[in-house]
Image (spheres, helix red, strand yellow):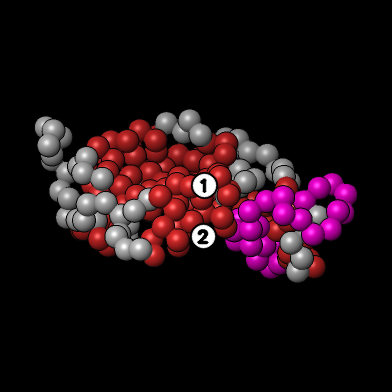
Amino acid sequence: MSGLEPLPETPRGLRRTALALYLLAALVRLTLLFGFGRYEIARPEPVRIAVSLARNGTFADPYLIPTGPTAHAPPSYPFLIAPIYRILGDTPSADMVRLWLSVLTGSAEYALLPYASASLGMGAVVGALAGLAGAVIPLHYWPESMGEFESHGRPCSCNCRSSGSPAGCGTRGPPAGDSAPGSGGGGGFWERPTFCRFSAGSR
């Protein structure tokens, strides 16, 4: 291994590191979002589908005019945020909750990097340094925080698949088993069809 060894690769040590990275990433992005007003309320296709699900129970109408049922967007993200619009209605408050959710979800990708690097045999400290850099330097702030598409969740899914379960942080590589490629591929279709190849091949 390299000389970067001071970070304890125990479950407790990794949990503490992950929690610190998560809180730091969320703090930076929430400060930009609400402290500096760096946001815009937009309604791209996945959000419009979510509003349709909340209003009518149909996976439909991704455009400015009603066009009926659609396969324009993967189903996971519209189904995830549809309850927000179901509870709060098609309102600015619902949009702000969507932004909160996007920040809290996107921040997890940096917290999971120590798990991913430890599982891939690079040592947890490598992932911790990468997570620290990503947390404090918000290069991808806009897609991570606006909640317009599912892009803030895909890196998180990549890290989960690379590292397996955070509870099993001491193991090397993702969980073995013949079911892993099939379940990963199915999950990839729900997130993004082009993501399916990585999901199915991560074993």
Q: On the image, which quarter does residue 142 sit in? A: top right
Q: On the image, which quarter does residue 183 sit in? A: bottom left
Residue at the image point whose x is 34% and y is 39% from the top: 131
| Three-letter amino acid code at the position of disc 2 | Gly
Provide the residue span drawn in magenta.
62-91
Q: Are marks 1 and 2 in contact (CB under 8 Å)?
A: no
Which residue, given by chain and number where applicable, does mark 2 sit on? 186
Give the image location of residue 50, x and y in percent: 70, 58
Regarding mark 2 in the picture, which secondary structure is present there? helix
Q: Residue furthest right?
A: 65
Quick one: 174 or 86, which is closer to the camera?
174
Mark 1 vs mark 2: which is more N-terminal?
Answer: 2
Q: On residue 170, which mark appears?
A: none
Residue 137 is at least partly visible in this image: yes
Q: Determine the CA span between mark 1 and mark 2.
A: 10 Å
Quick one: 162 or 105, which is closer to the camera?
162
Residue 13 is at least partly visible in this image: no
Q: Residue furthest front?
A: 178
| Three-letter amino acid code at the position of disc 1 | Phe
Q: On the image, which quarter does residue 181 sit in? A: bottom left
How dense is the environment of label 2, judged by Cα within 10 Å: few (below 14), some, or many (20 and up)? some
Q: On residue 195, which mark appears?
A: 1
Regarding mark 1 in the picture, which secondary structure is present there? helix
